[in-house]
């Protein structure tokens, strides 16, 4: 009976060594798989046979578990904006069909791209889950598919024009203001492009005319072809006012009025010209337009409107915010990538395709934003490599090979002894 048991014991050892080799071979085969986590085979002794007064005799070994090693893999830079790596704990969440089953899956492989519908997807086409953002860039709390590839930037009408300049204090006072001859009846001018509610650009020229010691008037003109009731080719005044300075050249007061009525857009469109911080408003009078003896010049001019824009590119920060850059020079948050953590991530089920499935043993997922609640941060333009250590795997392979050979010797030795036993009858 003991000889027969030793045959089965040796057989269990052969099986254990073969399973070890399978695990090692799987690790080596996936040494280049993005986000792959190595496994190790854990063995236990089988039920032993009790011999009265003589202790116990084991019946070999068995595979207890193939355990995933969820240590961090090295990060490799790729330069691709949609490639993401997790530095720390967490898994990306993807949804879609895999292996004929539609559901929610988890992965460390951040090889993402944009599909034809603008969704952020993995290479299998499963959609990355995250939090959507509204048109202002505010992220809401609803988890869902991240649609970022077809975002647009709507136009914004100009509400304010800011000007920083110097007006020459001893400039010659020109002839009376004539809108038909703005250049000849002014001392200086500056230009800026403003936008109406449809995003249509309007070139506005502001003319400054000295009227006396420390006093100026200004007039903003644009082509009448872009105005309601205007005539193309004829400059039309849309705003005007006065500027006053003290003997130090500081701005003391500003007056203005506007009547900007762009064609086919919101009418009238409020338009404020910000010339600085006049003393009458409690300012220094030196932060905007000043009046010094130096030649008239503009140092800064800006406006807060913009035309419509198409998506030109995206970037993702460490907290998962997807930032969209548009052709009109604006940018805003389009969404936020979500991560999931599990109490026992090594208990997740391997499903192939770098995907993992939830199990009862793994616990309930904790879903939230990256870099919060124990979840790792994201590294954009990088991928996490496999955590397989080839040197360690090759050593394990040698050990499994030697174990297989040794167990085969157990079987062959037991077979020889049984053969001797059979010859006793002769």
Image (cartoon, rainbow, N blue to C red):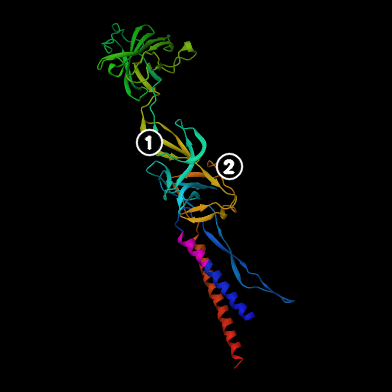
Other residues around mark 1 within 10 Å, as few (<14) / some (14–19) / many (≥20): some
Number of numbered labels in the structure image: 2
Q: Is 37 one of the magenta-colored residues?
A: no
247 and 333: which is toward the camera: 333
**In percent of the image, x 27 and y 18: which residue is there?**
225
In the rendered structure, find residue 142 and report the number of the disc placed on it. none
Q: Main secondary structure of the magenta part?
A: helix
Residue lying farthest to the left in this orientation:
233
Q: Secondary structure at mark 1?
A: strand
Range of the magenta residues? 20-30
Rendered location of residue 338, percent (x, y): 51, 42
Which badge, 2 or 1, comes first in the chain's sequence? 1
Q: What residue did someone put label 2 on?
A: 373
- In the rendered structure, find residue 311 and report the number of the disc placed on it: 1
- Between 387 and 263, the one nearer to me in the picture: 263
For the N terminus, the quadrant is bottom right
CB contact under 8 Å: marks 2 and 1: no
* Residue at image location 47% in from the left, 35% down from the top: 133
Q: In the picture, which quadrant includes the C terminus?
A: bottom right
The residue carrying pointer 2 sits among few (fewer than 14), some (14 to 19) or many (20 or more) residues within 10 Å by Cα, namely: few
Place residue 275 in its image quadrant.
top left
C-alpha distance separating marks 2 and 1 = 32 Å
Closer to us: 80 or 121: 121
Residue 52 locus on image (x, y percent): 73, 76
Residue beneath the point at 57% across and 49% down: 342
Instruction: Please say if 258 is above or below 138.
Output: above
């Amino acid at each position: 009976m003991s000889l027969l048991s030793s045959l089965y014991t040796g057989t269990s050892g052969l099986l254990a060594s073969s399973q070890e080799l399978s695990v090692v071979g799987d690790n080596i085969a996936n040494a280049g798989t993005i986000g792959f986590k190595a496994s190790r085979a854990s063995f236990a002794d089988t039920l032993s046979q009790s011999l009265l007064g003589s202790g116990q005799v084991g019946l070999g070994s068995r595979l207890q578990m193939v355990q995933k090693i969820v240590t961090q893999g090295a990060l490799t830079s790729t330069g691709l904006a949609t490639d993401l790596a997790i530095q720390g704990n967490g898994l990306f969440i993807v949804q879609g069909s895999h292996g004929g089953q539609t559901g929610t899956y988890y992965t460390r492989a951040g090889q993402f791209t944009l599909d034809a519908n603008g969704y952020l997807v993995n290479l299998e086409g499963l959609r990355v889950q995250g939090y959507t953002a509204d048109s202002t860039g505010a992220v809401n709390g609803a988890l869902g598919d991240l649609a970022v590839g077809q975002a647009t930037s709507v136009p914004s009408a100009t509400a304010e024009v800011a000007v920083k300049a110097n007006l020459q204090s001893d400039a010659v006072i020109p002839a009376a203001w004539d809108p038909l001859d703005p250049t000849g009846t002014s001392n200086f001018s500056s230009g800026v492009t403003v936008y109406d509610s449809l995003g249509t650009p309007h070139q506005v020229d502001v003319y400054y005319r000295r009227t006396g010691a420390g006093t100026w008037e200004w007039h903003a003109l644009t082509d009448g072809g872009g105005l309601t009731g205007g005539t193309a080719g004829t400059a039309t005044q849309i705003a005007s006012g006065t500027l006053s300075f003290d003997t130090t050249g500081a701005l003391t007061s500003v007056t203005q009025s506007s009547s900007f009525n762009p064609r086919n857009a919101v009418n009238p469109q409020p338009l404020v010209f910000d010339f600085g911080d006049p003393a009458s408003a409690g300012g220094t009078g030196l932060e905007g337009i000043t009046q010094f003896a130096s030649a008239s010049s503009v140092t800064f001019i800006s406006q807060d409107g913009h035309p419509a824009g198409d998506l030109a590119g995206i970037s993702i920060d460490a907290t998962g915010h997807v930032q969209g850059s548009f052709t009109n020079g604006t940018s805003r948050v389009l969404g936020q990538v979500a991560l999931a953590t599990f109490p026992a991530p090594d208990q997740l089920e391997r499903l192939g395709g770098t995907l993992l499935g939830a199990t009862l043993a793994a616990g309930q997922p904790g879903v939230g934003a990256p870099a919060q609640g124990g979840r790792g941060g994201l590294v954009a333009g990088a991928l996490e490599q496999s955590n397989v250590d080839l040197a360690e795997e090759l050593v394990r392979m040698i050990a499994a090979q030697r174990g297989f050979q040794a167990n085969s010797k157990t079987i062959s030795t037991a077979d020889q002894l049984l053969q001797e036993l059979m010859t006793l009858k002769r």
